Image (cartoon, rainbow, N blue to C red):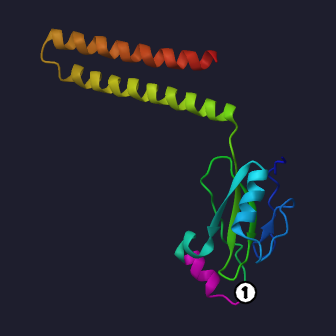
């Protein structure tokens, strides 16, 4: 298995560019063949169409012009770790192809751990806000003491999460 890597993007005067390691594909290349190539390279392909994905004024500018110039279009892929493979013209207008690497199991484990820690931190912060609100609305010393203890416990949980992260 090989992995394609990100390359510097230098678009031509009309805004087109193709990754130097991208295979030469033509109209006869099927989506299945493209997806198989992406899988061999440990990733997936995301396609953005100018017609439909770009702001209307960008798309209108392209389709109302006699020159196939898309240099003012800046396609975007929101998938983590993506990079551009190509901006090229098709019979339906310009498209942008992005490569999205498939995370390794180790990366997935780190993401799961970070997600778990984030959820713990969010819960502790939410509990701190609730306790603070209860303290503000306490009508007697006993309610104030309970709220203060809850705030201290929530803050201790936040501190422990941060300390564990700093130690890692």
Task: Estimate the x, y position of residue 101 in percent, counting from the top left.
Answer: 71, 48
Drawn side of residue 151 relative to residue 87, left or right: left
Task: Estimate the x, y position of residue 5 in percent, counting from the top left.
Answer: 81, 50
Nearer to the camera, 110 or 61: 110
Nearer to the camera, 34 or 7: 34
The residue furthest right is 20
**Above/below status of 151 relative to 92:** above
Locate the C terminus and report the quarter of the image it occupies: top right
Count of marks, rendered view:
1
**Above/below status of 102 relative to 26:** above
Residue drawn at (12%, 18%) of the image = 139
Task: Estimate the x, y position of residue 152 in percent, counting from the top left.
Answer: 35, 12
The residue furthest left is 139
| Residue 60: in magenta span | yes
Q: Secondary structure at mark 1?
A: loop
Chief SS of the magenta region:
helix
| Residue 64: in magenta span | yes
Task: Estimate the x, y position of residue 45 in percent, counting from the top left.
Answer: 69, 58
Residue drawn at (13%, 13%) of the image = 140
Which quadrant of the figure has residue 134?
Answer: top left
Residue drawn at (66%, 65%) of the image = 74
Which region of the structure is painted magenta? 57-67
Which quadrant of the figure has residue 94?
Answer: bottom right
Disc 1 residue crowd, few under 14, some 14–19, many 20+, Cα 10 Å: few
Drawn side of residue 52 relative to residue 149, left or right: right
Mark 1, residue position: 67
């Amino acid at each position: 298995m090989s992995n394609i890597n990100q390359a510097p993007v230098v678009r031509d005067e009309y805004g087109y560019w193709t990754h130097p390691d991208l295979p030469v594909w033509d109209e006869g290349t099927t989506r299945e063949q493209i997806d198989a190539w992406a899988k061999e390279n440990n990733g997936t392909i995301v396609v953005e169409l100018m017609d439909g994905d770009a702001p209307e004024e960008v798309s209108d500018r392209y389709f109302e012009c006699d020159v196939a110039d898309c240099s003012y279009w800046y396609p975007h892929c929101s998938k983590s770790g993506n990079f551009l493979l190509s901006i090229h013209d098709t019979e339906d207008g310009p498209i942008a192809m992005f490569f999205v690497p498939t995370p390794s199991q180790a990366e997935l484990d780190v993401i799961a751990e970070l997600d778990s820690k984030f959820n713990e931190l969010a819960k502790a912060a939410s509990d701190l806000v609730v306790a603070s609100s209860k303290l503000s609305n306490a009508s007697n010393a006993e309610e104030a003491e309970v709220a203060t203890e809850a705030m201290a416990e929530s803050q201790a949980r936040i501190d422990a999460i941060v300390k564990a992260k700093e130690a890692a």
